Image: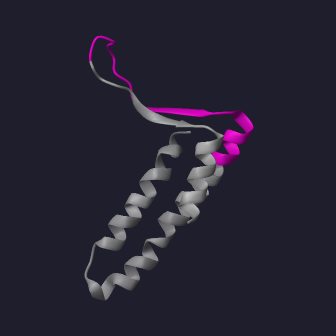
Amino acid sequence: MTLLALVPILPLLTAFIVLTGDRADQEHNAKAGLWPMVAGFAGSLVALAVVSIQGPLTLRLYDPASTFTLAFPVGFYVDRLSAVLMALISLI
């Protein structure tokens, strides 16, 4: 379920698409930015379905090798509530 990391990245991609370019291309950029948002919403719905069936998901993006360092693991933990909120926020 490594595609789960795309759900928060796709709205950032949309913001980058919409904000780049000049005023003449703003309508075109807004139309092009629609597809990553739709893909993010679809991904959040898939995550909601998977979490509802299989239980919570954990995705580790960075896991420190040593326990003696002050590094913290970075990742995603998606349970039912967070999956519902991902779908709701990406829909809005």
Total numbered labels placed on residues in the image = 0
**Image: 38 above or below 31:** above
Whole-percent x and y of residue 72? 34, 25
Q: Report the residue that reaches farthest toward the bottom.
A: 24
Residue 57 part of the magenta-drawn span: yes
In the shown orientation, is residue 20 left or right of residue 32? Answer: left
Instruction: Find the magenta span and give its range.
Output: 47-69
Q: Report the residue that reaches farthest toward the top.
A: 68
Q: Nearer the viewer, residue 52 or 36?
A: 52
Q: Quadrant of residue 23?
A: bottom left
Q: Which image quarter holds the N terminus? A: top right
**Image: 27 above or below 1:** below
In the shown orientation, is residue 91 left or right of residue 73? Answer: right
Whole-percent x and y of residue 16? 33, 65
Whole-percent x and y of residue 48? 66, 47
Residue drawn at point x = 39 percent, y = 84 percent: 27
Residue drawn at point x = 44 percent, y = 34 percent: 75
**Image: 34 above or below 61:** below
**Image: 67 above or below 50:** above
Residue 62 part of the magenta-drawn span: yes
In the shown orientation, is residue 31 left or right of residue 47? Answer: left
Residue drawn at point x = 50 percent, y = 64 percent: 37
